[in-house]
Amino acid sequence: MISNNNGLICLSNQKAECKISLFGGQIISYRPKTQKHDVFWLGDLNKFDNASAIRGGVPVCWPRFAAEELNNHFPRHGFARISNWNLDGIEIDEDKIEAKLSLVPDVKYNADVTATLFIKITDCLECSLETTNLGNKIFNFSEALHAYFNVGLRDETIVRGLSGCSYKSSLDGEIYTLENDLKINQEFDAAFNHTGIAKIEDKVFNRIITLEKIGSNKTIVWNPDKDLAEMSAGQCKNFICVEPANQGDAFITLQPKQSHKITMIVRVKNI
């Protein structure tokens, strides 16, 4: 089943259901039919006005991450999440959903590059962002698939797979090494040197969300420990962002006509 409501694409088959916003090129919902709860969290107070960035789902941070000096002439987190994307194609049958979106930057950004988003749903969700340098000069950029994972309660959730990795805290700028699995009960914002698999063990929803990455050298983990503008009261306690990324000292350099792809594969199983 496919429906399009003012740029919100709703897709469903016997495996899963998924919603994609063409504003931001953003997955805002994904629920395997085996699951009661959505895999991704979405702020209750989002405006969906095609002007404000959507908080939740999987925002595309491109071609700048956060407020980095690299590409600081672009908006915070880049312009992809506040741009209208093109829907290039949808294929759907009983066992598979595929969608392809693309973005040609507005002329005001003076960026001779394109972004293409590939979304594929089978027994898992596979999401890839491909950047192509169309110009004749080197293009440096940062990127992240800024996934907000929906959890029953942040304080009862464990992120596994990062133990032993060094990370830079965005709160104090210091570098640390994580000694054990990560449990968050206060504000946390860090970029881990990590290329492997992360697992989110959600004890309230009794499930494990597995995040596999390809083409990503950093994993960002974030929770603000306070409700932001798009959140209803207490909603900050119901997500953990675990994000495939290339940022900081792991930004991407593209030669002319060269392409780069970052991918995340998300699987869910009950405990």
Image: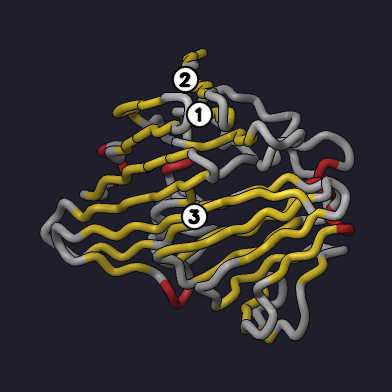
Percent coordinates x, y for residue 73 in the rendering: 39, 55
* Up-down relation of residue 35 to residue 115 (above or below): above
State the separation of the CA atoms marked 2 and 1.
Answer: 6 Å
- Residue at the spot x=47%, y=31% of the render? 95
Q: Quick check: marks 2 and 3 in contact, CB under 8 Å?
A: no
Q: Secondary structure at mark 2?
A: loop
Residue 215 found in image quarter: bottom left
Mark 2 vs mark 1: which is more N-terminal? 2
- Residue at the spot x=65%, y=70% of the render? 190
Query: Looking at the rendering, in which quadrant would you find the C terminus?
Result: bottom right
What's the amino acid at mark 3? Met
User: In terms of depth relative to the viewer, which is nearer, 1 or 100?
Assistant: 1
Q: Which disc, if any, is residue 21? A: 1
* Up-down relation of residue 24 to residue 209 (above or below): above
Mark nearest the camera among 2 and 3 is: 3
* Up-down relation of residue 70 to residue 58 (above or below): below
State the separation of the CA atoms marked 1 and 3.
Answer: 18 Å
In the rendered view, does 191 fall on the left or right side of 229?
A: left
Mark 2 vs mark 3: which is more N-terminal? 2
Residue placed under numbered mark 2 in the picture: 7
In the rendered view, does 252 fall on the left or right side of 44?
A: left
Residue placed under numbered mark 3 in the picture: 264
What's the amino acid at mark 1? Ser
Q: Quick check: marks 2 and 1 in contact, CB under 8 Å?
A: yes
What's the amino acid at mark 2? Gly
Percent coordinates x, y for residue 84 in the rendering: 40, 30
Percent coordinates x, y for residue 139 in the rendering: 25, 62
Mark 1 vs mark 3: which is more N-terminal? 1
Q: Secondary structure at mark 3?
A: strand
